Amino acid sequence: MWRSEAPISISNLAIGLSAQMALLALLTMRWKVSYHAAASIGLVLVSRSLGNSSLTLALLALAVSVGWARFYQGRHTLAQLAVGACTTAPILLLT
């Protein structure tokens, strides 16, 4: 990214997403973590960094719906959804 002279915001997003994926991979080796929650909350954070509040609210509603569906279908517990959502911390810190 540095060699291609990408904007710093894109570089930071790439670093944040890479850190999130590494964290998810490590956690999933020991415990089932919701990648769906991680991805949907990640989209919310990226839209927030763009400053588009209506898009952020729509994506937040979608993220809550995705989490509810995963819980309702018995695919994840609330703890697994929460941990998946918390893996977005690198994105939050870098964007």
Image (tube, rainbow, N blue to C red):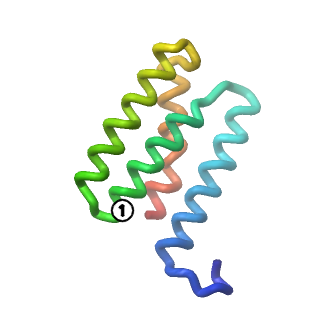
Q: Amino acid at mark 1?
A: Ser
The residue tagged 1 is 49
Q: Secondary structure at mark 1?
A: helix
Residue visible at 49% across and 39% down in the picture: 86
Question: Who's the residue at 60% across and 64% down the image?
Answer: 15
68 relative to 70 in the view: left or right: left
- Give the residue furthest to the left: 54
The quadrant holding residue 28 is top right
Q: Eyeballing the image, is 87 above or below 12? A: above
Q: Is residue 14 above or below residue 82?
A: below
* Residue at image coords 61%, 30%: 33
Question: Along the horizontal axis of the image, is 52 left or right of 28?
Answer: left
Q: Position of residue 27 (x, y in %)?
A: 68, 35
Q: Residue furthest right?
A: 29
Location of residue 45 in the rendering, given as x and y in whole percent from the top left corner? 40, 52
To which quarter of the image does residue 1 belong?
bottom right
> What x and y, as percent, mark residue 79?
51, 22
Residue in the foreground of this view, choosing between 23 and 34: 34
Horizontally, is 89 left or right of 49 in the view? right
Residue pictured at 30% horizontal, 44% vertical: 58
Residue 94 at x, y = what percent? 48, 63
* Looking at the image, residue 90 lies above or below residue 31: below
Query: How many numbered circles does the render carry?
Result: 1
The residue lying toward the viewer, choosing from 5 and 55, is 55
| Crowd tier of the residue under label 1, counting other residues whose Cα lies within 10 Å: few below 14, some 14–19, many 20 or above | some
In the rendered image, the quadrant that contains the C terminus is: bottom left
